[in-house]
Image: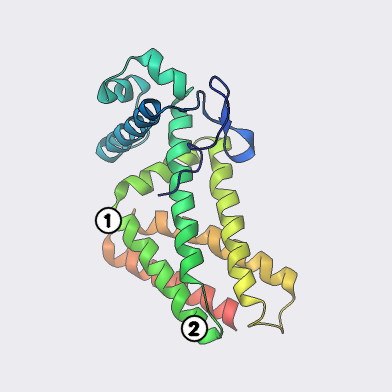
Amino acid sequence: MGETGVGSQTGVGSQVTGAEGAPVLRRQPSQRRSREKVERILSCATALIAAAGSDAMRMSDVAAQAGISIGALYQYFPDKSAIIRALAERCTEDGRHCIREGLAGIDSLDGFRTAFGNLIDTYYGLFLAEPVIRDIWCGTQADPELRTIELEDSRANGAMLASVLRPLRPDVDPRRLDAECFLAMQLGEATMRLAVSVDRAEGDAMVDAYKTMVLDRLCG
């Protein structure tokens, strides 16, 4: 996964900010031991979320699991939301890389249909195989600042989608295409969360319906 929200360089004691200037790290880990401590904190937080969900995760539990004092934890992450934000931004960067790779070199609508369908199947598979991803994104929904991560992710991914489609759909108003691609990516996130919250057969059907609706609209 990418290092978004964790690896930015600033002076020790300053805040590293994520989406919309929200604080992610309170203290920048400039030394290797400090970076390893941050990685351990995030790894332990991921394990706790996987075991009981993001709502049940407490800062004291993260500190105990990581083998550090609660004061040491607060030196790096000001609150629980900052931990979830760092994890969410890592998922975001990883997903954006996957989309960029999946859409590379497409030169036909048939190629786009295949590539986009494969991306949706891959993303759905990740949600099914790694429940912690779903729980991290659920954790973002309770906080307005964290919701901006998903919104900006959908906007950026929609822009990538539109850049591939514009030369393939010269008949479509670019502004309409931009809006539809943005909407397609935002609805994709909602579809995944819904699909993994119902039984597998119904979830599979929902994902298939989403792919059909979006591809029919985008490809004409």
x%, y% of residue 136? 40, 42
> Which of the two residues, 2 or 169, is positioned nearer the viewer here?
2
> Which of the two residues, 91 or 150, is positioned nearer the viewer here?
91
Kind of residue at disc 2:
Gly
x%, y% of residue 203? 34, 63
Kind of residue at disc 1:
Ala
Q: Is residue 151 above or below residue 178?
A: above
Residue 199 relative to residue 87: left or right: left
The residue positioned 52% from the left and 24% from the top of the image is: 26
Q: Which residue does the numbered mark 1 point to in the structure image? A: 129
The residue positioned 56% from the left and 65% from the top of the image is: 184
Q: Report helix, strand or loop for mark 2.
A: helix
* Marks 2 and 1, how far apart at CA: 27 Å
Q: Earlier in the sequence, mark 2 or mark 1?
A: 2
Which one is closest to the eye, mark 2 or mark 1?
2
Mark 2 touches mark 1? (CB < 8 Å) = no
Q: Which mark is residue 208?
A: none
Residue 196 relative to residue 212: left or right: left
Residue 139 relative to residue 51: left or right: right
Q: To which quarter of the image does residue 164 belong? A: bottom right
x%, y% of residue 169? 66, 82
Q: Is residue 158 above or below residue 143?
A: below
Q: To which quarter of the image does residue 180 belong? A: bottom right
x%, y% of residue 92? 48, 50
Q: Which mark is residue 111?
A: 2
